Amino acid sequence: MTVTAAAGFEAAGIAAGIKRSGALDLAVVVNRGPSQAAAAVFTSNRAKANPILWSEQVIVDGTVSAIVLNSGGANCFTGPEGFQVTHRTAEATASALSVSAGDVLVCSTGLIGDQLDGEVLEEGVLSAVNRLASDAVAGDDAARAIMTTDTKPKTVVIEGGGWRIGGMAKGAGMLAPGLATMLVVLTTDADLPAADLDTALRAATRVTFDRLDSDGCMSTNDQVTLLASGASGAVPAVDVFTEALTEACRNLALQLQGDAEGASHDITIEVRGAASEDDAVEVGRSVARNNLFKAAIFGNDPNWGRVLAAIGTTQAPFDPYLVDVSMNGVRVCHAGRPDAPRDDVDLTPRATHVLIELHAGEASASIFTNDLTHDYVHENSAYAS
Amino acid sequence: MTVTAAAGFEAAGIAAGIKRSGALDLAVVVNRGPSQAAAAVFTSNRAKANPILWSEQVIVDGTVSAIVLNSGGANCFTGPEGFQVTHRTAEATASALSVSAGDVLVCSTGLIGDQLDGEVLEEGVLSAVNRLASDAVAGDDAARAIMTTDTKPKTVVIEGGGWRIGGMAKGAGMLAPGLATMLVVLTTDADLPAADLDTALRAATRVTFDRLDSDGCMSTNDQVTLLASGASGAVPAVDVFTEALTEACRNLALQLQGDAEGASHDITIEVRGAASEDDAVEVGRSVARNNLFKAAIFGNDPNWGRVLAAIGTTQAPFDPYLVDVSMNGVRVCHAGRPDAPRDDVDLTPRATHVLIELHAGEASASIFTNDLTHDYVHENSAYAS
């Protein structure tokens, strides 16, 4: 069901001809109301794509009628012509739906530096608007149309009390935050104003998408959008809604991790005993970005020395001679010294748990990452070809 | 000739039995004076190996009689027993040479978390001291004895006016700074006091080893040591000496880059037009650490979009729509937009030049890195086995 699971939403996903493969490459999601409240968070990369520059303006008033998303090209570093293509896409969508272009978000994903064809996008938008529907097939087509190197669509539905959250996401590489680093559209038929949606969305992404760090590379095009139709008539408490939204975001984030380019391990790095949550995140992220650690996990090697070397590069308070490290339940390092034999650790399962106990405080956080594999190198050396 | 090229120095490299392979694994370099002035810089990793903790104390008074170095084990995160092994190694060396243990530096390199055998090291030291010589063979053996995954020894000799600098280095992975990230011993027969040596060494490493960033991973054991015997009787001006020392360090740094684990490209990232030198370094390092960029270079793909995406994650002042990017002399991005066709770029040579012109100021810097290859993943997933 994805984005059409929530009442008040229609979607479509079509093959507009942007991808040479002929695969689905353009999605439209429309909010039929009665409310059109919305919130969005964008990449913190300072090199932003044209659709980000556009969408940052659209979201200012908290009102969004529709969002149009294309795969097959990021429309990033394509100059004023590229911005005109984004603008034209929004205008075509607005015209077909009889809404204001200023209420249409645009998202693009694919290779940086390739110019998109405005004519192809405009025709695609018209075709997609003609196919809008509120059923499961339409929602699923939309989720497929935003895929790039993803091997499967990522969707979620969360049931509230008389209201729902639906969502779709794409992303398989450049998964590191600053925030989102992927395209995500979340819909809800709860009736909440834009300010509450914004609060809930920032709270949810902070502990989900922001904690996903597949390869340390931050995209130029990431956007997480939340659209609320109010069609259920239900007005949940903001904290209850935030909890459900966080669950939806966590579910999608773990789907992104599970489909990361070339990965053979989904690694949760849990940091406990940090002096602050920020310290825990910094330590977890430093380990998640350490290529030597990532390659070791690929080789099923519980190389805890690389974990400690990575922690040592952070600013977080810790004593190297108090740190414990466990891998898949086996404590291989205790108080900065060898503990259980490396051979006791079984790293063959895809799901991998690394627990770091800093003994520097009470705060904790988990970072979600992947290993560094031959397939990652292969996919990312051949992406443009 | 390496470290024995400068008058006043003797060296030895032997197989002490630390490495199971039976390869050379222990080196001693002795300064016979008349001066025993010295300077050293150490890893900025806060997780420091036992030999670093020891050597940081030894260097305080600027006097060093000898340095003993072993491969086959990093002696890092090995607890108080590990520190005792370092202490015992220094004592054994001091006793055999009739000097103070407080004037003996110790360096170790290899796997983190493995305990070294103090008995083996002590016997190795005695054997090495018996073989000390000032000839080319002795210097070459020492350079070979500190190798880990290095495929060849790294040595340098610089001729001053009546004085010389000799050097040896090891390092093939974990090449990222904070400072050194490798073991380097430099000798000179120039007669300079420890304070001048320290000034010269810090100036030289700042623009050489500190600009080498092979894989973004910072070692726990890195140390660059400069020993001066004064045996030439020459007293060069500090700036003249610093220039020669910088040349020696640059030469060794490029040898380290050229032998980086699994690399197929030696990449110079030159950043021009930055607002400050620090900004230029930050931008260059951000690109050098971007796995997607590194994998693209491995695939001979001039993917400049990944360069811009990496720049966008920095704090350096720049306008994404003014940036130019050239690869091997072909400007593929001009003012943030596609310029020459990607196909015009030939990335098949091992030497790769990426020029980034920020148009934000007058400062510049170059960072030296490598590509991300299948061989890198293979070597680093199998290192411990």
Image (spheres, coloured by chain):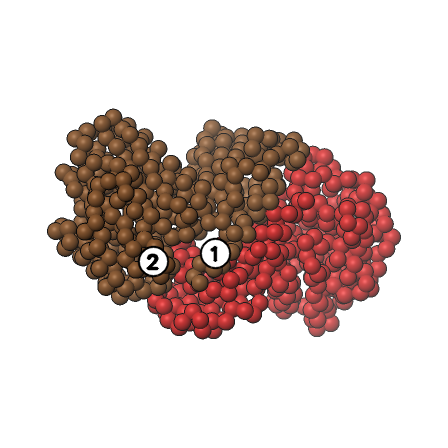
Chain colours: A brown, B red
Residue at (31, 35) in percent of width and height? A157
Determine which quarter of the picture holds residue A304: top right
The kind of residue tagged 1 is: Asn
Residue B206 rendering spot, x and y as whole percentages: 56, 59
* Residue closest to the eye, B69 or A60: A60
Q: Nearer the viewer, residue A147 or B99?
A: A147
A218 and B238: which is toward the camera: A218
Extreme right residue here? B130
In the depicted view, which residue is nearer to us: B352 or A25? A25
Is the residue marked by circle 1 packed among few (<14), some (14-19), or many (20+) residues within 10 Å?
Answer: many
Whether residue B384 is situated above or below residue B204 in the rendered picture:
above
Position in image of residue B192 (x %, y %): 69, 61
- Rounded to the nearest angstrom, the CA distance separating label 2 from label 1 is 22 Å
Mark carried by residue A380: 1
For the point 70% across and 61% down, the residue is B152
Q: Which quadrant holds the C terminus of chain B?
A: top right
Give the crowd class for mark 2: few <14, some 14-19, many >=20 residues within 10 Å. few
The answer to whether residue B378 shows anywhere in this view is yes
**SS for callout 2:** loop
Identify the residue shown where x is 21% and y is 38%: A228
Residue underneath mark 2? A22
Q: How many labels were placed on the picture?
A: 2
Q: Is residue B238 visible?
A: no
Q: Is residue A229 left or right of residue B335?
A: left
Quadrant where the N terminus of chain B is found in the figure: bottom right
- Position of residue B201 in the picture relative to residue A142 (left or right): right
Tags 2 and 1 touching, CB below 8 Å: no
Q: Chain of mark 2?
A: A
